[in-house]
Image (cartoon, grey):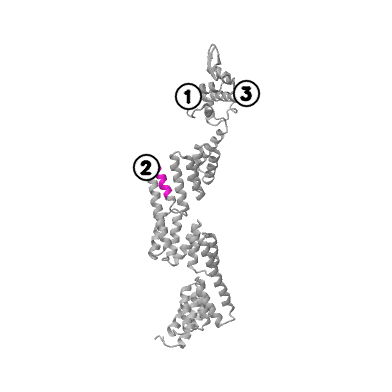
Amino acid sequence: MKRQGDRTHSWEAEAYKEKGNAFYAQKDYNQAYNYYTKAIDWSCKNPSYYGNRAATLMMPAKFRGALEDSQQAVRLDDTFVKGHQREGRCHLTLGNAMAATRCFQKVVELEPNNEQARQELKNAAAILEYEKIADADFEKRDFRKVVYCMDRALELAPACHRFKILKAECLALLGRYPDAQSVASDILRMDSTNADALYVRGLCLYYEDCIEKAVQFFVQALKMAPDHQKARLACRNAKALKAKKEEGNLAFKSGNYELASKLYTEALEIDPNNIKTNAKLYCNRGTVNAKLKKRDEAIEDCSNAIKLDETYIKAYLRRAQCLTDTEQYEEAVRDYEKVYQTESTKEHKQLLKNAQLELKKSKRKDYYKILGVDKNASEDEIKKAYRKRALMHHPDRHSGATAEVQKEEEKKFKEVGEAFTILSDPKKKARYDNGQDLEEDGVNMGDFDANNIFKAFFSSPGGFSFEASGPGNFFFQFG
């Protein structure tokens, strides 16, 4: 069959058009498309054939192809209302509100009573307003509002990749990585070369601390669009962050803790928006500070890590250990409780139990502190400490002091005796160290007689006494 491209009309073209109309009515859009195409082959200058084929493409949401046919239809006949209307609808659905506005204004010019066109003009104006608000909110980093605006705009322009990409980027910046990935992946399934979607995929991986994979996506985006500034900046930051973090890890492993701390600090300055990686960097620096015995700084670093990532178990564990080391037992217990609630392992249960025990022990008298010895002090060290403290606080030594001082020194003397009685007895000491309640084990603290303990320790045939050898000076004298 010979194509009659220079003919404006033919019965063959009309026959194909009628068949196309029949399939369109049956919602068989593929067949309708094929027959409209045959009609165009017979009569390529008939605007209605292009308009019909555009309508067929719009049904399965092939708006870009439909836009081309609509534009060809109105090029052939500038008074073709349906052509302008379909072109406007395609522009609107694809998010080009300015172009859509021009099309619908032409429809209203041709048909002043066309209510559908007037409504579409309102929709186009709404999209333009949402875009304006979103641009301002993005500059203010109010990403939630941007997402809201893009959701509203997408209700009117569901095929707009630009709106979807902006929404996905903001979702990533809000930490909603699965949602952002989903939007970007949908676009890449339709257009695998979309640089913006590749950038968003990389951004999600970057913020999830999968930096090496993120770089691959950024590089791919730059291949598709060499001038993509956001992808270029993100790629540079990702490479710098990865390198600096690895340098810090290497310094830590080699035992150069001061250098490791410096490198982690420098890494933290690269990109404040990378929450997950920065949480790890804070925790790493906290570990370094713990090694350097800078426990307050370590606690602060771990707290910063937790602020960035409330699920970061390692940071809770590190902080809890530092809190224990600084005798902040209640705070340590809270951290271990959080860890155990999140990961109920035997190890975490034991850590919580140990912290609870230390908290319980901290609320009792600290006999080691009273004697001024370490918890690992030997029997001889405990005896020496008792000798020193007992003589220091013995009431006879302070007989010339004020009543208030005498009372305070007598109290300390009794506590020293009590401490020595417990710590010099291996069984009592073991129960005390294990956090057991000594009174429950039959040890009545009220039964201690500090003088008897003193006499037994300093036993001698002639007894003992403190006598003055001058103002404020005393010596121990055996009788």
Q: Which residues are magenta?
A: 251-266
> Closer to the N terminus: mark 2 or mark 3?
2
Q: For mark 1, does the 10 Å Cα neighbourhood hold few (<14), some (14 to 19), or many (20 or more) residues? A: some
Residue 405 visible in the shown view: yes
Quadrant position of the N terminus in the picture: bottom left
Residue on which disc 2 sits = 254
Distance Cα–Cα, label 3 vs label 1:
32 Å
Residue 225 at x, y = what percent?
40, 65
Q: In the rendered view, would you say 189 is above or below 451?
A: below
- Amino acid type, residue under disc 1 in the picture: Glu
The residue shown at (43%, 48%) is 265
Residue on which disc 3 sits = 403
Residue 258 lies within the magenta run: yes
Q: Main secondary structure of the magenta part?
A: helix
Q: In the rendered view, would you say 378 is above or below 2?
A: above
Residue 444 lies within the magenta run: no
> Closer to the N terminus: mark 1 or mark 2?
2
Q: For mark 2, does the 10 Å Cα neighbourhood hold few (<14), some (14 to 19), or many (20 or more) residues? A: few
Q: For mark 3, does the 10 Å Cα neighbourhood hold few (<14), some (14 to 19), or many (20 or more) residues? A: few
Distance Cα–Cα, label 1 vs label 2:
38 Å
Residue 211 location, quadrant: bottom left
Q: In the rendered view, would you say 131 is above or below 48?
A: above
